[in-house]
Image (cartoon, helix red, strand yellow):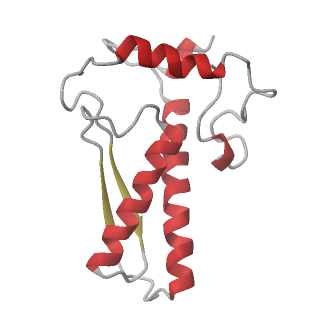
Amino acid sequence: PRHFWAAPFEIGDEFGGLGYPSPMPDEANRILLKYRDKHFGRQTETGGNTTIAVIATDAVLTKAAAKRLAMSAHDGFVRAIWPTHTPADGDLVFALATGTSGIELSADAAIDLYAAAGATMARAISRGVYAATPAENDLFPVWSSRMK
């Protein structure tokens, strides 16, 4: 379908402004059933569906807080990619904090940062898919060429 799973997190028209289909089509659940029936029991090559990302902040974070930031950003994969977290995936998010702002987060600010991390990752993935252009010898089509 011509829509992004991450539609609720889009700002402006950064990945087309398509939103969710409205009303949701009756066959929406058929996608799940079709995928299940087609792929159930089939293991793809390990690492064949891997997504690797980086999330960064200029806040001051401890090692534990940076780990929490990576975990929160990883939630953005679920909001933008389907399926995700399968046994064949090697999904990974690296987090880094430069500390250049000098800001040490209060508990409330940390919650806001972690919530924003998931939404930011979902947006980044969708923007990348939306903006991708074909290159010579690509094995697969880009999103825009499949939506014509």
Residue 24's spot in the image, x, y percent? 75, 26
Position of residue 59 relative to residue 22, above or below, is below
Residue 47's spot in the image, x, y percent? 21, 32
Q: Is residue 87 left or right of residue 105?
A: left
Name the residue located 37 percent from the left edge and 60 percent from the top edge.
71
Name the residue located 66 percent from the left edge and 40 percent from the top edge.
7
- Of 137 and 59, nearer the camera is 59
Name the residue located 81 percent from the left edge and 26 percent from the top edge.
23
* Residue 97 in sight: no
- Of 23 and 60, nearer the camera is 23
Q: Residue furthest right?
A: 23
Position of residue 101 relative to residue 53, above or below, is below
Position of residue 142 relative to residue 53, above or below, is above
Residue 91 image-quadrant placement: top left
Question: Quick one: quadrant of the N terminus?
Answer: top right
* Residue 29 in sight: yes
Residue 63's spot in the image, x, y percent? 26, 77
Q: Is residue 97 left or right of residue 145?
A: left
Residue 83's spot in the image, x, y percent? 42, 31
Name the residue located 56 percent from the left edge and 18 percent from the top edge.
31
Residue 58 image-quadrant placement: bottom left
Q: How many marks?
A: 0
Q: Residue furthest left?
A: 46
Question: Quick one: quadrant of the C terminus?
Answer: top right
